[in-house]
Image: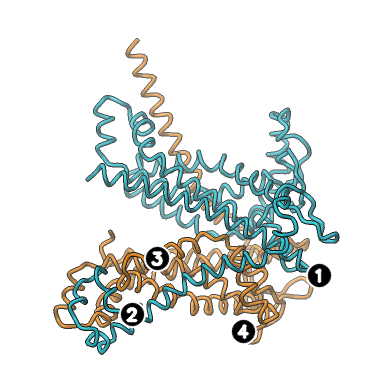
Chain colours: A orange, B cyan
Amino acid sequence: MNNARLKWRKFVSNFMLTMTGLCALVSVSALFFILGYLLFNGGTSINWAFFTQLPKPVGETGGGMANAIVGSGKLLLAASAFGVPIGFLGGVYLAEFSGGFVASIVRYSADLLNGVPSIVIGIFAYSMVVLPFKHFSTLAGAFALGLMMIPITLRSTEEFLKAVPKNLREGAMALGASKSKTISSVIVPAAYRGILTAILLALARVAGETAPLLFTAFGNRFWTNGWTTPTASLPVMIYTYAVSPYEDWHRQAWAAGLVLLGLILIINILARTILSRGIAVPRS
Amino acid sequence: MATPTTTFGSASPVTGSRSFLARLREGDEIARLVTFLFAATVVLITILLVYELWVNSVLPRHKFGFHFFVTSVWDPIMDEYGALPFIYGTLVTSAVALIIAVPLGIGAAIFLAELAPPRTSDTLQFFIDLLAAVPSVIYGLLGVFIIVPLMRTVIAPTLIKTLGFLPIFKGPSYGVGFFTAGIVMAIMVIPYIISVSREVLLSVPRDQREAALALGSTRWESTWQVVVPFAKTGIMGSIFLAMARALGETMAVTMVIGNSPKIAASLFAPGYSIAAVIANEFTEATGDMYLQSLVYLGLVLFLLTFLLNGMARLLILATTQKGSKVAA
């Protein structure tokens, strides 16, 4: 009797533990399904024209997304130029200069900003940049994406700077270096891998954002000159092409999806290897 | 803020002993001021965001008031706006997503934290992190071309045949609809549940497990009756976090929900969500009332995710602190 109960308990234990393994397997396999489908569908539809040509007029087959690739690049460049300095220097302030109260307000704001749905960021960028300039622009899109980069960069910069061992800081100070000198030539270099990783991850995250671009960068079927006109971008192109009724556009949506996902995964993997190879900072 | 007194009690007490002039000469005060300005920008932006949402939704707030949330007329021509169908769609799709994602995510987190050897666990976590990095529009793409046809031809007919007596599985399926959106969303939020729950489970002190095992419980009993209850609040936190993500999810949902502002009991019916209607109609909105109604929806979405994220943070913090307190 007792023995049967023990057997039952052991059976339940093994069964449930196998189930949790199955859950893990299903979740992880989702990634490989996504990759597999994109490689298959995107790989068969990608070609040289995709990278070099402009979109063809509606109804004609062929053409590419050269303008969207350049557009995405410009958006990310401008977004980094806006978001990274604020996030990085704000993070330096939090880790090195700030007392308790101001820091908690800044931290709280950053967390709040991080949780804002991307579509709401889009509305904000619309009312801040699009309305005053009276038209959609690369800058408006970059503003929205840059906003989303700030909280990630800020919090990770703070975290990595704080993880720098105290004796490095004290050593520099003992040599008579001023605080700003200590930060710029000892602490930040010691934490730069971590900070770089955070910036790359932030970049990878916003590279695929579509919702905030819909009514800021909008879209464009031609080359964009300068920064103040609407621009095409890869994520928005994927969206527009995927929901369109044209067979050839679906093909190009898959190709664009493959390029975008490939880019994002490569940045992610790169960022994580930077962090894992020879860390100068012990992770707290 | 660049007064010398405020530096006291900050990360480094060494600075306090030098005179203000010396620090000014060496650039410390300038560095402090510059970094402070950038940090203040973050606060300013956040305040501005809330302010803009509030000011730009004044018309519908005054005209419709609370009725905005309980009426289901969305008529740009008559300038009548009610948000009920969108709120309903957002809640239903999030609920479907969580019903699928929570058991799967927590199961996987238990496996990663309790069973898998550290190396395997880290490798799998790496894949989970990559899954979390897949952008929403890619999920939408796969949703449109794989899950929607699958839903129309396989999933919906099977469910209608077996569980068709339930009102939620009645009616024809067009492929797009609440259920499809819920499934796509579920796949998107699973990584968040796994990552946070795993972290929380790993912070449960070791002796809790060992005590349970020493008392003769099986591995599963120690996990389910000791470790999971210990981490319960943190796991709830991960679910709130996932819910906040799900509510604000835009592109994937827009692509598969069907975009029709109707309230239907059947999960197979096409619907609409708050984020989706903003994405679709914002650029076409003519007239102040129309545009501001959409901003108002954005404000509602913001407040919902704000509340959920806040609760999630509190719960996760409570658990991890409990873990370190017991361990200490």
Asked if badge 2 and badge 3 are on a common chain, one would say no
Q: Chain of mark 1?
A: A
Secondary structure under tag 2 reads loop
Name the residue nearer the viewer: A75 or B175.
A75
Mark 1 crowdedness (10 Å alpha carbons): few <14, some 14-19, many ≥20: few
Q: Report crowding for label 3: few under 14, some 14 to 19, many 20 or more residues within 10 A (C-alpha).
A: many
From the viewer's perspective, is the residue at label 3 or at label 1 nearer? 3
Instruction: From the top left corner, tell me how far across and down residue A96 is, in percent.
Output: 30, 72
Secondary structure found at label 4 = loop
Q: Nearer the viewer, mark 1 or mark 2?
A: 2
Chain letter for mark 2, please. Answer: B
Measured along the vertical axis of the image, is residue B206 above or below residue A149?
Answer: above
Q: Quadrant of residue A166?
A: bottom left
Which residue: 40% across, 33% down? Answer: A17
> Residue A189, percent across and down?
29, 76
Q: Are marks 4 and 1 on the same chain?
A: yes
**On screen, residue A251 above or below A1:** below
Give the foreground label among 2 and 4: 2
Identify the residue position indicated by label 3 in the image.
A155
Q: Amino acid at mark 4?
A: Trp
Q: Residue at x 76, y 68 (%)?
A: B288
Q: Which residue is mark 2?
A: B2
Q: Chain of mark 3?
A: A
Give the Cα separation between the discs numbered 3 and 1.
48 Å
For the residues tagged 2 and 4, is the chain the same?
A: no
Which residue is labeled 1 in the image?
A59
Residue drawn where x is 35% and y is 39% of the image = B115
